[in-house]
Image (cartoon, helix red, strand yellow):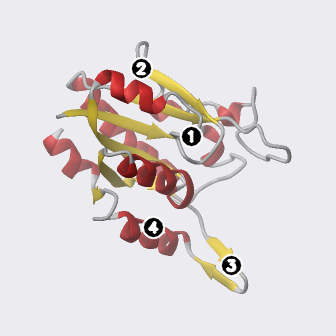
């Protein structure tokens, strides 16, 4: 079974002083870098996904800004593919699926930012496309969300989305657990 690491949107705007700071971004980035090191050590495929905002009124991930850049904690190396995207789903209007198929990838390990948006959407899409997915819960970050008069803490959002993904769309594990079988 061929396994690839999919690093989704670990970009500067999600870190402290960025335009859309997430709760726990630094910690998630640190753990994502550990997953990345494990994949590099075993010469397994690594794919970076970089969100570039193109819709009118966007306030972060703007082209040609420091915030759109991939964070140093997971900087791509020569030979590692960087796929730009313009929607939450990493597969939508990108060459990601074709690239994975060309490599014969059947299993994805996912790390990244905005658990409630880009991670959720991309993992569900990957599962629907037939990939076996593993999501590193400690290498993802999100933020508090509000609907009407209810505000849910970042911790609550993270727990709710991980619970919804686990089992149906991916196996949710820690970076250490994933690194032990990669």
Number of residue marks? 4
Tell me the residue at 42%/71% (across/down). 159
In the image: residue 145, left or right of residue 35: right
Residue 35, given in percent of the width and then of the height, sits at 31, 39
Residue 134, given in percent of the width and then of the height, sits at 29, 50
Considering the numbered disc 3 on the image, is that residue within a helix, a strand or a loop?
Answer: strand
The front one of 77 and 171 is 171
Tell me the residue at 15%/44% (across/down). 180
Considering the numbered disc 1 on the image, is that residue within a helix, a strand or a loop?
Answer: loop
Position of residue 8 relative to residue 24, above or below, is: above
The numbered mark, 4 or 2, whose residue comes first in the sequence reads 2
Spatial distance from mark 4 to mark 2, Cα to Cα? Answer: 29 Å
Mark 1 vs mark 3, foreground winner is: 1
In the image: residue 29, left or right of residue 146: left
* Mark number displayed over residue 80: 2
Query: Is mark 4 in CB contact (under 8 Å) with mark 3?
Result: no
- Residue designated by label 3: 147
Spatial distance from mark 3 to mark 2, Cα to Cα? Answer: 39 Å
Mark 4 vs mark 1, foreground winner is: 1
The numbered mark, 4 or 1, whose residue comes first in the sequence reads 1
Name the image quarter holding the C terminus.
top left
In the image: residue 40, left or right of residue 114: left
Spatial distance from mark 1 to mark 3, Cα to Cα? Answer: 26 Å
Query: Is mark 1 in CB contact (under 8 Å) with mark 3?
Result: no
* Mark number displayed over residue 161: 4
The front one of 53 and 40 is 53
- Residue designated by label 1: 92
Mark 2 is surrounded, within 10 Å at the Cα level, by few (under 14), some (14 to 19) or many (20 or more) other residues, namely few
Mark 4 is surrounded, within 10 Å at the Cα level, by few (under 14), some (14 to 19) or many (20 or more) other residues, namely some
Q: Specify the quadrant of the image occupied by residue 77.
A: top left
């Amino acid at each position: 079974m061929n396994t690839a690491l999919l690093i989704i949107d670990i970009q500067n705007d999600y870190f402290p002083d960025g335009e859309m700071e997430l709760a726990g971004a630094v910690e998630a980035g640190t753990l994502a870098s550990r997953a990345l090191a494990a994949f590099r050590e075993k010469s397994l495929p690594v794919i970076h996904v970089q969100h570039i905002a193109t819709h009118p009124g966007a306030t972060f991930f703007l082209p040609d800004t420091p915030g759109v850049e991939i964070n140093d904690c997971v900087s791509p190396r020569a030979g590692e593919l960087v796929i730009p995207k313009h929607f939450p789903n990493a597969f939508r209007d990108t060459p990601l699926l074709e690239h994975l198929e060309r490599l014969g990838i059947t299993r994805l390990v996912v790390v990244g930012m905005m658990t409630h948006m880009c991670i959720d959407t991309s993992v569900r899409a990957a599962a629907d496309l037939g990939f076996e997915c593993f999501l590193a819960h400690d290498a993802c970050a999100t933020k508090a969300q509000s609907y009407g008069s209810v505000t849910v803490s970042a911790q609550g959002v993270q727990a709710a989305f991980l619970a919804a993904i686990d089992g149906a769309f991916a196996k949710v594990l820690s970076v250490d657990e994933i690194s032990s079988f990669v």
